[in-house]
Image (spheres, rainbow, N blue to C red):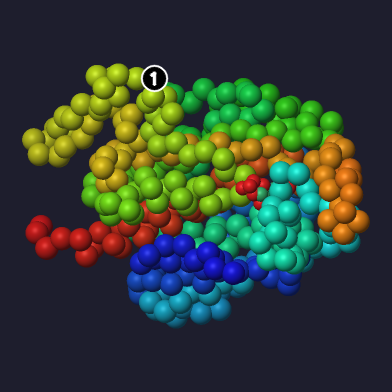
Amino acid sequence: MSGNTFGTQFRITTWGESHGPAVGVVVDGCPAGLPLSEADIQVDLDRRRPGQSKASTSRSEEDKVEILSGIFEGRTTGTPISMIIRNKDARPLAYDAIRNTPRPGHADYTYQAKYGLRDHRGGGRSSARETVGRVAGGAVAKKLLAQSGIDVVGYVTELGGIKASIQSMRPSDLRSAAETNPVRCPDREAAALMLQAVEEARKEGDSIGGSAEILAVGVPPGLGEPVFDKLDADMAKALMSIGAVKAVEIGVGIECARMRGSQMNDPLAFVEGTESKVGFETNNAGGILGGISTGSPVLCRIAVKPTPSISKRQRTVDLVAKGVAEIEVKGRHDPSIPPRIIPVAEAMAALVLADHLLRQRSARLID
Ligand SMILES: Cc1cc2nc3c(=O)[nH]c(=O)nc-3n(C[C@H](O)[C@H](O)[C@H](O)COP(=O)(O)O)c2cc1C
């Protein structure tokens, strides 16, 4: 199975399945000398961890990370950083019912069609457990970015049709406000309604989808490798590679189709108090022009579908008995994915930026 590695210079390979003994990641290409401890990684793993609220699955994993290589006396050595996180709360029997009856909306049928066999327990490698490795690798990327003053923050902007109002909020406030509630929405009033919507869907044996934004501040101008590794192209791939993400927007995104050039273009201006530092009056471009960062915040938006595993009765087929079938999906599932996707999406955006930050160091000779 190929396709488990992401990145060019700063690269991760994730491994492991939902109901195997462990999941993990190998980070390759991280420069030597970065101060790094298990505590740095654990912060984001704790944010991703299931079983923390009614907005997430009740699977209870402590998700303690163990770093196996690549660190000496608290600093990276430039060699591969291997991390393992053990699966402790697997309940494989809950998935017996879907061994031969693929869940609508999940990857059961396509894995079977591709490989001819599959680990059906908890969705195997198509499970959100795989994202543990992304978050651990992303935490290393975030630490590297922090050294250059780059910060990545994610938050929910819409859930079950309820929209947040966040236009007037500063990036630093977005994080603190979002992390105070289980749906990770910075707008407190909207968050309360969203939580209600999650509860209602859960009671009905159903699920809801939503949207989230990922904002990177402090990104210098110049990151991105035209033409095929443009920053926006890599961001789109990174975010779209997360299960359940069905659309990615940069800046105003889809809305640009309804705008005029005079509305869309961000006027250039010198940053106040300087005569040489270029900035932009607006940021419709989402901080990227020609695939290269402009120096404005990089803004991405993702649309996340409703969780496919629902306990409502659904039609499927029995691949062994070769007949039509109905299933009610058992096991423990997130009634809504966006609140849990935030640390994963931040990790993927951080991985892209760390990769391009390192690649930029070999892009020019002229100061
Ligand atoms: C953080 C996160 C949590 C998820 N939780 C669940 C879940 O509890 N149950 C489920 O059926 N799918 C869940 N998913 C979605 C599936 O992994 C995804 O829908 C599936 O792999 C099919 O891929 P696709 O939706 O991209 O086509 C989750 C995804 C993420 C990123």
**Observer-nearest of 72 and 351:** 351
Q: Is residue 331 above or below residue 200?
A: below
**In the visual, does 298 lie left or right of 100?**
left
**What residue did someone put label 1 on?**
258
- Say which element carries label 1: helix
Q: Is residue 125 above or below residue 337?
A: below
In the rendered image, residue 36, in percent from the top left (x then y), is placed at 45, 68
Quadrant where the C terminus sits is bottom left
Quadrant in the picture for residue 320: bottom right
- Amino acid type, residue under disc 1 in the picture: Arg
Quadrant assignment, res 45: bottom right
Query: Would residue 48 appear left or right of 141 to someone viewing this image?
Result: right
Q: Position of residue 120 (x, y in %)?
A: 78, 61
Residue 112 visible (yes or no): yes
Query: Quick check: 351 left or right of 89?
Result: left
Residue shown at 43%/53% (left/top)? 350
Measuring from the top left, give residue 353's x and y in whole percent.
37, 54
Observer able to see residue 86: no
Which quarter of the image is occupied by the N terminus? bottom right
